[in-house]
Structure formats: C-alpha cells, structure tokens
Image: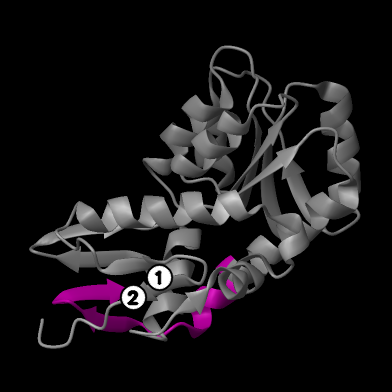
Amino acid sequence: MFDVLLIEDDRTLFQEMQERLSQWSYTVHGVQDFSRVMEVFTSVEPQLVIIDIQLPKFDGFHWCRMIREHSNVPIIFLSSRDHPTDMVMSMNLGADDFVQKPFHFEVLIAKIQAILRRVYNYNTHASELQTWFGATVDFERGRVTANDTSIDLTKNESFILKQLLEKKNKVVSREEIIQKLWEDERFVSDNTLTVNVNRLRRRLNEIGLEHVIETKVGQGYTARDGAGS
C-alpha cells in the first residue's frame, strides 16, 4: 500500500482518479483548503505526490518548491496547458514526471508504477557510498558531499548519476538511461532527460564538481573517473 497525495481542484477528476487508483491498492488523499497544502503533506507523509499546475491560491509550481524544501518524495505534475515550458519548469523544480491532460489512465498508472519501483526498490539495493573527485556520493540518502558542503539530489538525479558512475569514462547512451530510468521510453520525451542531466550538472557545480559529466554529441553522457582526485 502506498499513500498518494493528489493535489487536484477538479473534484470530478479527483474522484475518478481516487477510484481508479484505489483499484490498484493506492490510498489517495486530497486537499480541501488549497492554502494549507503543506499541512496536508506533513500529515499524510505520502510516498508519491500528484499535483496539478493550475490550482486556487497558489499554482502547483509554488507547492512543488515548498515540498522540495522538505522532501525528495517523487512528484508527478498534471497540466491541461499545452506549454513546453511547463514541462521544463516542472523538471527544473525537481519533479519526476509530467503528464499532459487529457491522459490515458493506463499511461498514468505505468508512470506511477515505474517511479515507485525505481524509488523504493532502488534505494534498498544501491551501493551506499562512492568516492568521486574527492566527493562522497551517498546513494541511499541521495546526497553528494564535497568541500565541506552537501547537496541533496532528487530521485531522478541520483539514479542518473549512479548509471554514469557505474561506467566511468565510458559513454552511457541516452536511450540506455531513459530505458532504465523510466522503464519504457515510450512514456518519456527526449527533452525530459536533457532537463534532468542539466539540473544534475548545476547541482554538482554548486559544490565545485564542474565538468565532471561530459556530453558526447549524438551518443550520450560520460562521467569522468576522477582518478587521482
């Protein structure tokens, strides 16, 4: 059983999603007062958040920022707007996926299942610690520490970094990362991976790990091995 916090103000859609998700043994929690989303989040402590972009009071981006200040829980955005910038903004804020309305419920379920398997099984089996360019990478906590400073990675960022570090100095193709990360590349755009990798680079730059992930044009990405660092 997983607790899902569904932040959706369309009551008809909420009730439909609650009913359908319940059939898959997910416990769905909602929000009544959209100025108190964080209170509900803290009370429920969900394993997954699904959030609409257009909401009363504050939009979904605002609440994603607030959640990310306290938690790396997986987040899926829903949007009825056909703006490519919405997806880019979502990923930059640390969301794990983006679903365009109207959507096929089977696609949403596939995305939810892939994320939950990756997040809650991956951490159990990941190697706990690695040293890389003098930094300590803690996959269990999703944390990288260097120069007495730590950053917390999202689940996607941590997973991508793990794939690259498993093959240091070797090219890991974009297709391989997409397939392992989302399990079915039909459900993710190529641009989503680019956004995630760019965000990972920016986070590593914050602790002095610059130019440690290289882009191989037309091939994929390489993590330098950091030998002697």
Nearer to us in this view, 107 or 16: 107
Left or right for 3, reference 160:
right
Identify which residue is drawn at 80% across, 22% down: 10
List x then y, in percent, for residue 21. 84, 50
Q: Callout 1: helix, strand or loop?
A: helix
Calculate the distance from the C-alpha at mark 1 to the C-alpha at mark 2.
8 Å
Q: In the rendered structure, which amino acid carries the disc numbered 1?
A: Leu
Identify which residue is drawn at 53% across, 38% down: 88
The residue where tag 2 is placed is 223
Q: In the rendered structure, which amino acid carries the disc numbered 2?
A: Ala
**Is 122 within the magenta?**
yes
In the rendered view, tell whether residue 34 sits above or below residue 61.
Answer: above
Left or right for 134, reference 10:
left
In the rendered view, tell whether residue 223 sits above or below residue 81.
Answer: below
Q: Quadrant of the N terminus?
A: bottom right
Nearer to us in this view, 159 or 64: 159
Q: Are marks 1 and 2 in contact (CB under 8 Å)?
A: yes
| Magenta span of residues | 119-138
Residue 74 in view here:
no
List x then y, in percent, for residue 217. 45, 65
Identify which residue is drawn at 62% across, 32% down: 84
In the rendered view, tell whether residue 101 sits above or below residue 119.
Answer: above
Q: Quadrant of the C terminus?
A: bottom left
Other-residue count near label 1 (Cα within 10 Å), few / some / many at <14 / 14–19 / ≥20: many
Tally of numbered discs? 2
Identify which residue is drawn at 87% across, 32% down: 15
Left or right for 93, reference 224:
right
Q: Earlier in the sequence, mark 1 or mark 2?
A: 1
The residue where tag 1 is placed is 161
